[in-house]
Image (cartoon, helix red, strand yellow):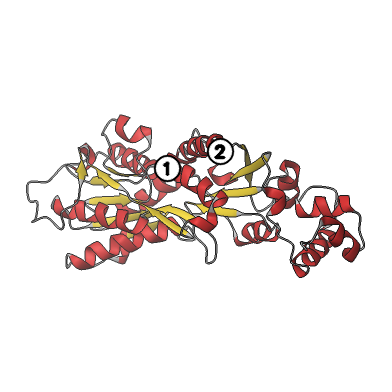
Amino acid sequence: MSVTVRDIADTAGVSVGTVSRALKNQRGLSDETRRHVRQVARDLGYDLGRLRSGKAQRLVFLVHRHHSSFAVNPFFAQVMHGVEEACRAFGVVPTLLTAGPADPLRDLLRMHEPDAVLAAGFFETELIDVLRGMELPMALVDFWLPGCPSVNPDNAEGGYRATCHLLDTGRRRIAYLAGSLAHFSIRERERGYRRALFEAGVLADPDLEVVAPPGLDTSRGAEAAMRQLLRLRRRPDAVFAYNDTAALAAIRVCTADGLRVPQDIAFVGFDDITAAACSPVPLTTLQVDKEALGRMGVELVLRGMELPREIVLPVQLVERASSARSPEAAAPCFGANVVS
């Protein structure tokens, strides 16, 4: 005979309503009561997915406050479009929630009473611990942690292709302009960058790997990092920036300093946001299908047992004016698929 909510209530010494709220992670209970009821349910062999199998499902699309200004950081706005499209197909109601480490994330989530959570971008460990403690189906988009289902663009391959492309155009002093290396995607792009240099026999110069100062937004951080590169005795002849917003900010610093792009210094970004193609010097970049990330993230949350726990989506090099070939171009580093 299957275990019922009444069985759990009797064993836990609480009401049926309390059991229902605990299993649905609804408001109105202390953490201690919630954990007690859910542990009793597990001990009795109750399927905690049962109460999420109805039609009225809710999914919270959680974005870190650092990424939540979509006008400044349009990447996650496009991811959200994919989330909305997939939720309509599944009959799920999506809501957007932004949070940072100082916010009461557990309380905020309970106000939404979600059946599942899709967390996009970097999150501090303490926030992920809160999410795991909610015991809801969860997946990560553009982020990775051991044991968590995730969907990411192929960051390492993208970093590799970006750097190989710059090597192919004759550049040899190629800098990597990074944000915080706590971000999984930024570390992976750096890994691809280093691999390309190694395979080309180009000695990696640690002075050419710069990290934007902490506490600044993407543009101001990239501007500061670019100024650091321009102060070097031997400045770079190319820059691979960890995303397009950073690349465009770095280009502005160079042009203000009298440098020509791409004649004096070439640039490649990552993401292919709308501004990349529309900038005064159109930006070469790695194209990411951002809406596909959102759609696949929803599928990973709602159909997790049917899919791999870690999904990697391909990226594509889009070549534009910011990395035009120099007259001294070397033999190609590799045969990349390029979209012009």
Q: Give left or right: position of 269 versus 103.
A: left
The x, y position of residue 67, in whole percent, is 53, 44
Question: Residue 122, can we see it?
Answer: no
The x, y position of residue 273, in whole percent, is 38, 37
Dot 2 alpha-carbon crowd within 10 angstroms: few under 14, some 14 to 19, many 20 or more: many
The x, y position of residue 239, in whole percent, is 28, 51
Question: Residue 165, can we see it?
Answer: yes
Q: Give left or right: position of 42 versus 233.
A: right
Query: In which quadrant will I find the C terminus?
Result: top left
Q: Which residue is mark 2?
A: 87
Residue at (44%, 39%) from the top-left corner? 291
Comparing 55 with 204, the one in front is: 55
Which marked residue is nearer to the observer: mark 1 or mark 2? 2
The x, y position of residue 88, in whole percent, is 55, 34
- Name the residue type under label 1: Ala
Q: Which residue is mark 1?
A: 292
Q: Is residue 53 above or below residue 307?
A: above
Distance in Å between CA atoms under marks 1 and 2: 13 Å
Residue at (31%, 53%) from the top-left corner? 158
Q: Earlier in the sequence, mark 1 or mark 2?
A: 2
